[in-house]
Image (spheres, grey):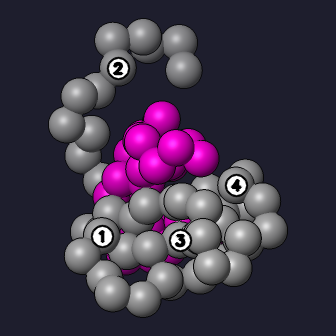
């Protein structure tokens, strides 16, 4: 189970996908949506986990649990 972070790279001006605790980026994408999709794919391939999406200010603005990871705060909304 691995967690990934999606953030804007200051050096390349692209969106960076980085494994939590890793030194180097796992990948880059032109858009945040592409980077989020790749991060979710990486997390799924490693047994699930959390994908945390950072805004341009560097703060986490969203977090998604990727199956088969266990969400530490599962939503109460059962429609989605």
| Real-space CA distance between mark 1 and mark 3, rounded to the nearest whole angstrom | 10 Å
Mark 2 or mark 3: which is in front? 3
The residue under the point 37% across, 74% down is 19
Question: Where is mark 3, residue-wise?
Answer: 17
| Quarter of image, res 5 | bottom left
Depth check: give the residue in front, 60 or 4: 60
Callout 1 secondary element:
loop
Are circles 1 and 2 on residues that touch, CB within 8 Å?
no
Q: Which mark is residue 46?
A: none
User: Which quadrant of the figure contains the C terminus?
Assistant: top right
Q: Is residue 31 in view from this perspective?
A: yes
Residue 62 % position (x, y): 47, 36
The residue under the point 50% across, 83% down is 26
Mark 1 or mark 2: which is in front? 1
Q: For the magenta stretch, what is the residue range? A: 38-65
Are circles 4 and 3 on residues that touch, CB within 8 Å?
no
Q: Which mark is residue 75?
A: 2
Q: Earlier in the sequence, mark 1 or mark 2?
A: 1
Question: Where is mark 1, residue-wise?
Answer: 20
Q: Earlier in the sequence, mark 4 or mark 2?
A: 4
- Residue 26's place in the image compared with 79, above or below, is below
Question: Where is mark 4, residue-wise?
Answer: 32
Q: Earlier in the sequence, mark 2 or mark 3?
A: 3
| Real-space CA distance between mark 4 and mark 2, rounded to the nearest whole angstrom | 24 Å
Q: Residues within 10 Å of mark 1 (few under 14, many from 20)?
A: some
Q: Residues within 10 Å of mark 4 (few under 14, many from 20)?
A: many
């Amino acid at each position: 189970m691995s967690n990934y972070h999606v953030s804007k790279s200051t050096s390349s001006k692209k969106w960076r996908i980085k494994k939590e605790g890793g030194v180097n980026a796992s990948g880059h994408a032109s858009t945040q949506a592409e980077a989020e999709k790749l991060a979710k794919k990486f997390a799924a391939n490693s047994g699930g986990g959390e994908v945390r999406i950072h805004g341009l200010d560097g703060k986490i603005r969203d977090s998604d649990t990727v199956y088969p990871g266990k969400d530490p705060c599962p939503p109460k909304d059962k429609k989605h």
